[in-house]
Image (spheres, rainbow, N blue to C red):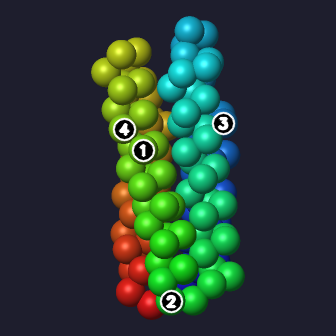
Amino acid sequence: MEFRIQKQTREFVESIYKLKFPKDEKYNLESQLKRASVSISLNIREGNTFKGKNRKRFFNIAKGSALECDECLILLSNLYGVSTTESRAELLSIIKQLQTLTSNLQTL
């Protein structure tokens, strides 16, 4: 189960890095979205080295980062029309899967 979510988070990070951002967002939404996407993967990876409360804490952080990515994508859509691209719909689908998988992992 952890392997599947780790693979999905890597694919999500790669998708984020392939997005074309407006030039004036390089140090704002682009930077924030990239950091948050990497945070999902890193926290799931690190959480898998723990058990109990510590594991749950890292998965909660990963879930929070996924929600942060979702909000960044909504803002990009509202401000720059990113929602018209297929990549945004794909990324939102991946985020929802990550949230579901992270919630499932938290019950361990």
At horizontal 37% and vertical 58% (from top left) the residue drawn is 96
Circle 3 or circle 4, nearest the eye: 4
Numbered tag placed on residue 71 in the rendering: 4
- Would you say residue 89 is visible in this rendering? no
Which residue was labeled with disc 2? 52
C-alpha gap between disc 3 and disc 2 = 33 Å
Q: Secondary structure at mark 3?
A: helix
3 and 4 marks in contact (CB < 8 Å)? no
Residue tagged by mark 3? 17
The residue that appears at 48% across and 52% down in the rendered structure is 65
Residue beneath disc 1: 68
Circle on res. 27: none
Residue 34 position, x and y percent, is 61, 38
Comparing 77 with 27, the one in front is 27
Name the residue type under label 4: Glu
Alpha carbon separation for disc pair 4 and 1: 5 Å
